[in-house]
C-alpha cells in the first residue's frame, strides 16, 4: 500500500532512473517520453533536472488505463520518428543491448517485442481452482518490454483499440486488432517488472 514502484530506490537511484538511462545509452533512441500520473510529474521533473539529459526527455500525463496512457504518449511522438518503443518504466533491469536487438528486429519486420519462452509447466483450471488440463508450453512466450513498432503502425493500432473500446494489456495486443504480425526477441537476461517492494532485490542492476 502506498508503494510507488517507479520512484522506489535500488541502491542510490530510483527504478525509473535505471530505466531511462538504459534507453539513453542506445544509439537508436533520440528521445524518451515519460508517461506518468499527474501526482508524480513534479518528482520526475526534479529527477531529470539533476541530470544533463533533460533535453532528451519529455513528460506527459497518463490516462485511466494502459491504452489511454500509451495513446497520450503517442500524441507527443515527433513526426520524424520512424519507430517508437514502449517500455514499462518498472522494468529497470532492461539492458541497452536488448533494446537495440528489439529495434533491429522491428526495423526488419515492422514490429517486435522482447519476450521469454515459458519454462514452467502450465495448467488450465476451472473457476474453483481444480486443474482440468495441461497446456503445451512449446509455443508459449511471456511478453515483456520494450515492444517496438513503426510509429504509424502503432498509432493505427491504438486508434482501432479506442474505436473498439478494447482495453489492450500490451502493444502486441493492439497490433493483433489490426491483423499485423509481431516478432518476438528472446531476452536471455532476466527483465522482471517491479510490482511489490520485495521485487527491488530481484537481482543486481548492472547494465
Image (tube, rainbow, N blue to C red):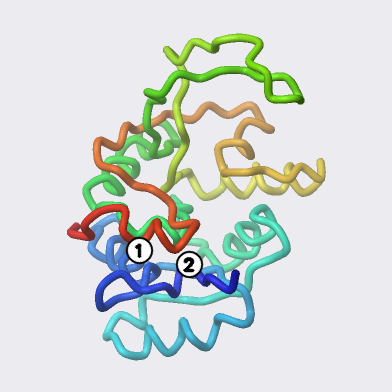
Say which quadrant the N terminus sits in.
bottom right
For image coordinates 67% across by 32% down, the residue present is 178
Disc 1 target residue: 19
Marks 1 and 2, the one that precedes in the sequence = 2
* Residue 61, x across and y down, in percent: 62, 74
- 49 in relation to 203, above or below: below
For image coordinates 30% across by 43% down, the residue present is 190
> Disc 1 versus disc 2: distance between alpha carbons?
12 Å
Picture quadrant of residue 197: bottom left
Q: Which mark is residue 123?
A: none
Using the rendered image of the protein, determine whether residue 63 is visible from the camera's viewpoint.
yes
* Residue 204, x across and y down, in percent: 21, 57
Residue density around tag 2, few if under 14, some if 14–19, many if 20 or more, within 10 Å = many
Say which quadrant the C terminus sits in.
bottom left
* Residue 203, x across and y down, in percent: 25, 53
Q: Quick one: SS at disc 2? A: loop
Q: Quick one: SS at disc 1? A: helix
Q: Nearer the viewer, mark 1 or mark 2?
A: 2
Judge from the rendering whether residue 198 lies leftward or rightward of residue 98; answer left or right: right
- 49 in relation to 102, above or below: below
Q: Which mark is residue 5?
A: 2
Amino acid at each position: 500500500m502506498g508503494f510507488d514502484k517507479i520512484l522506489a530506490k535500488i541502491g542510490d537511484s530510483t527504478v525509473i532512473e535505471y530505466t531511462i538511462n538504459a534507453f539513453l545509452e542506445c544509439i537508436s533512441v533520440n528521445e524518451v517520453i515519460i508517461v506518468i500520473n499527474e501526482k508524480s510529474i513534479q518528482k520526475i521533473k526534479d529527477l531529470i533536472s539533476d541530470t544533463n539529459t533533460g533535453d532528451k526527455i519529455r513528460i506527459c500525463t497518463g490516462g485511466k488505463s494502459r491504452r489511454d496512457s500509451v495513446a497520450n504518449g503517442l500524441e507527443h511522438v515527433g513526426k520524424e520518428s520512424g519507430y517508437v518503443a514502449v517500455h514499462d518504466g518498472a522494468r529497470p533491469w532492461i539492458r541497452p543491448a536488448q533494446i537495440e536487438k528489439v529495434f533491429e528486429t522491428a526495423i526488419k519486420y515492422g514490429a517486435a517485442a522482447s519476450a521469454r519462452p515459458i519454462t514452467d509447466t502450465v495448467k488450465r483450471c476451472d473457476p474453483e481452482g481444480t486443474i482440468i488440463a495441461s497446456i503445451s508450453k512449446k509455443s508459449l512466450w511471456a511478453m515483456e518490454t520494450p515492444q517496438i513498432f513503426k510509429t504509424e503502425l502503432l498509432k493505427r493500432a491504438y486508434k482501432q483499440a479506442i474505436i473498439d473500446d478494447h482495453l489492450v494489456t500490451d502493444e502486441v495486443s493492439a497490433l493483433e486488432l489490426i491483423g499485423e504480425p509481431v516478432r518476438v526477441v528472446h531476452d536471455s537476461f532476466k527483465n522482471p517488472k517491479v510490482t511489490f517492494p520485495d521485487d527491488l532485490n530481484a537481482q543486481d542492476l548492472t547494465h
